[in-house]
Image: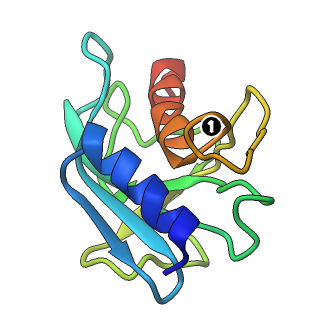
Amino acid sequence: MNSRIEKELEILSSFYPKVTFIENGQWVLIEDYPIPLGLSWNRQQTNICFQIPLAYPGTPPYGFYVPVGILYEGSPPKNGYRESPDNKPPFPGTWGFFSWQHDTGWRATSDPQTGSNLLNFVRTFKDRFLEGS
């Protein structure tokens, strides 16, 4: 694993203690990601995973996966979600994919603590959940 990703995983783990990294394919799993309270999702937390692109940090991560069965107001999400993604995560279970990107612009710097990083990306997942279906 390269030192940049190693440092960013340390930063990520300081906020989300259950982080698993699989070097083959550069997959990250976060267990028990909190879904903002007061929304109509059928879960208060969920496992989430995503893939770090090979050209990272020049190319930002895109999208995230959750175990199939997530519902908003009793139905599967409609906007930018599919239950049978082409790229399957290496973690157990069946996963659905949310099409999602870092909306505020990706500005990685040589120091991952001062520019865009994996923690910034993961924190934006909350914004997708706030959108609802």
Residue, x 42% and y 43% (percent of image)? 76
Badge 1 crowding class, 10 Å Cα cut-off, few under 14, some 14 to 19, many 20 or more, is: few
Q: Along the horizontal axis of the image, is 61 left or right of 7?
A: right
Of residue 117 and residue 123, the one placed in the foreground of this image is 117
Q: Along the horizontal axis of the image, is 124 left or right of 102?
A: left
Does residue 55 lie above or below 128 as drawn? below
Percent across and percent down for residue 2 are 55, 77
Q: Along the horizontal axis of the image, is 80 left or right of 36?
A: right
Q: Along the horizontal axis of the image, is 44 left or right of 76?
A: left
Is any part of residue 86 visible from this angle?
A: yes
Percent across and percent down for residue 36 are 31, 20
Percent across and percent down for residue 113 are 55, 38
| Quadrant assignment, res 35 | top left
Does residue 97 lie above or below 23 as drawn? above
- Residue under circle 1? 79
Percent across and percent down for residue 86 are 61, 78
| Quadrant assignment, res 121 | top right
Does residue 130 lie above or below 88 as drawn? above
Q: Residue furthest bottom?
A: 24
Q: What residue type is disc 1 on? A: Asn
